[in-house]
Amino acid sequence: MMNNTVWAFWLFVAIVFFVVEASTVNLTTIWFGIAAVITMIAALITDNYYVQAVVFIAVALVMLFFTKPVVTKYLKPKQTNALTLIGQQAPVTETVDNLNGKGQIKINGNVWTARSIENEIIEKGSVVTVAEIKGVTAYVKK
């Protein structure tokens, strides 16, 4: 039992899953890596490949379906205040002209660089609706 080297296989599998997770960061393969580590421990206890396979599958499924939702809930990006501006109306304080790279709106007391989402000139004093926020620029439409 102790001369069993199958544990090295499970260690290799875990490392592969962890490397894939590090390169994709989609929080999926990490659970398989953890399952491989647990299965590596099981391989130190038993030579039975069927038991090892069942341990790997069971742990991977439990981790994937029960742990992942909890972790992603706490790790998902929080909505920024800027995103709450989408759909709001705002007065144009400087004519919006995409071609000349000009335009500003004032919303919630803050001045934002503005560009027309429909590539049209929107005159100062007009009221626009914020359609999208990219960085520090509000993309607006009449």
Image (cartoon, rainbow, N blue to C red):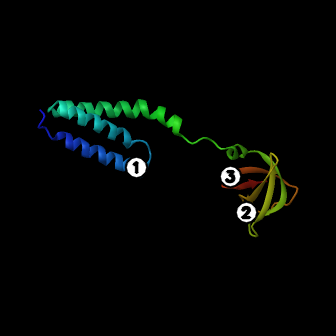
Q: Quadrant of the N terminus?
A: top left
Q: Position of residue 30 (x, y in %)?
A: 38, 41
Amino acid at pointer 2: Asn
First-in-chain label (3 vs 2): 2
Q: Tags 1 and 3 in contact by the CB under 8 Å rule?
A: no
Q: Secondary structure at mark 1?
A: helix
User: Is 62 or 74 nearer to us in this picture?
Assistant: 74
User: Is 62 on the left-hand or right-hand side of 91?
Assistant: left
Residue shown at the point (42%, 29%) measured from the top left: 66
Question: Dot 3, how many residues are within 10 Å of its Cα: few (below 14), some (14-19), or many (20+)?
Answer: some
Q: Secondary structure at mark 3?
A: strand
Amino acid at pointer 3: Ile
Q: Give the labeled residue for mark 1.
A: 22
User: Is 56 or 115 nearer to us in this picture?
Assistant: 56
Q: Position of residue 104 (x, y in %)?
A: 80, 58
Q: Secondary structure at mark 2?
A: loop
Question: Dot 1, how many residues are within 10 Å of its Cα: few (below 14), some (14-19), or many (20+)?
Answer: few
Question: Dot 2, how many residues are within 10 Å of its Cα: few (below 14), some (14-19), or many (20+)?
Answer: some
Q: Quadrant of residue 112?
A: bottom right
Q: Tags 3 and 2 in contact by the CB under 8 Å rule?
A: no
Amino acid at pointer 1: Ala
Q: Where 100 sits versus 16, above or below?
A: below
Q: Give the labeled residue for mark 2.
A: 119
How many angstroms separate mark 1 from mark 2 (CA)?
Answer: 40 Å
Residue shown at the point (86%, 59%) measured from the top left: 124
How many angstroms separate mark 1 from mark 3 (CA)?
Answer: 29 Å
Q: Position of residue 137 (x, y in %)?
A: 71, 56
Q: Give the labeled residue for mark 3.
A: 133
First-in-chain label (1 vs 3): 1
First-in-chain label (1 vs 2): 1
Q: Farthest residue toward the bottom? A: 100
